[in-house]
Image (cartoon, rainbow, N blue to C red):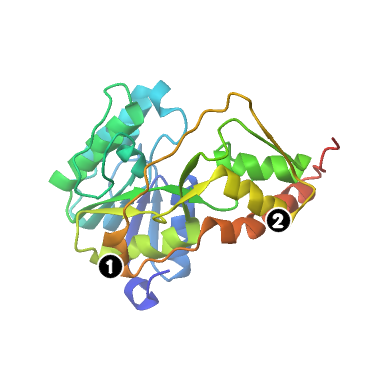
Amino acid sequence: MADPLWLHGQRWTVVGARGWIGAALVASLQRAGASVSARSHGDAPAGVAGHVVWCSGVAHGADGAPRPSFRAHVIAIEGWLDAPEIASFTYLSSTRLYDLCDSTNEDTDLILRHDAIYAMTKAAGEALVIAAAPGGRVVRLSNVYGSRPESPLFLNDVLRQAALGRRVRLHTSLDSAKDYVGLDETLEVLPRIALAGRERIYNLAAGRNTTNGEIVAALQHNDPTIELVVDADAPRRISPPVAVTRIQNEFGFAPRPLIDAIPDLYRDACAYFERAGRVPDSH
């Protein structure tokens, strides 16, 4: 977490506080002594004050849910912009906006497909915040990881398979790769960007891709009983490496590599399912 002297007594409003990142941010700010209002994007903005962080979004299946995506990522923002006591407005976006781009620098011109609802709506939300929000800033997050044993996202699914079955089946190739950044590091730097960021857009990422093969190898190093199966026709999907020079230079951001966190994540998953009475399958 940022310097407690910065945060103690500060007023914050977290929109999307029921989501994983939003709820974690509320708890983190409160531990640092900040006054935090936890809100949903559908709430009336009355009483909004201080530093607003917009965490609200459609996390899964956005391309098949265009109307909820436009509401959460763009339309709902408009009603919050005129609140009289906003000190800053930080919008959480995604590095997925770079999927078709030649560069992942924050100032690159984005290339978006008209039917890519998630990317299109996030880009529209960014534009609105930068153009109209007081102290508007955008943070493009890569794949944020942490202990989420029931999450359907790729990394969590791999950990769950390993914990429950000691067997991992991959539907994408071993050399498929993307950027992962830890939740704790994300929560530490977000308030610093909101309070003192000199730029309007930041990539919040590790700056390095991790392959599926590296993840499974780290699991097998930790537990040699884990077996691996890869679909015969598994596609190769590699996200463009994310540029992180801006956040490194301004905030000294140096996140822990995902591979170093795998033992802890695997232990957490095993403990979670053991507490839930779900024992490993035999195979």
In-front residue for pair 247/227: 227
In-front residue for pair 110/78: 110
Q: Quadrant of residue 103?
A: top left
Badge 2 local density, few (<14 within 10 Å), some, or many (20+)? few
- Mark 1: amino acid: Asn
Q: Quadrant of residue 67?
A: top left
Q: Is residue 150 visible?
A: no
At horizontal 27% and vertical 37% (from top left) the residue drawn is: 101
Which residue matches tag 1? 249
At horizontal 80% and vertical 42% (from top left) the residue drawn is: 278
At horizontal 55% and vertical 53% (from top left) the residue drawn is: 146
Badge 1 local density, few (<14 within 10 Å), some, or many (20+)? few
Which quadrant is the C terminus positioned in? top right
Disc nearest the viewer among 2 and 1: 2
Image position, residue 197 (x, y; %): 24, 63
Measured along the vertical axis of the image, is residue 176 above or below residue 264? above
Which quadrant is the N terminus positioned in? bottom left
Which residue matches tag 2? 221
Of the numbered discs 2 and 1, the one sitting upstream in the chain is 2
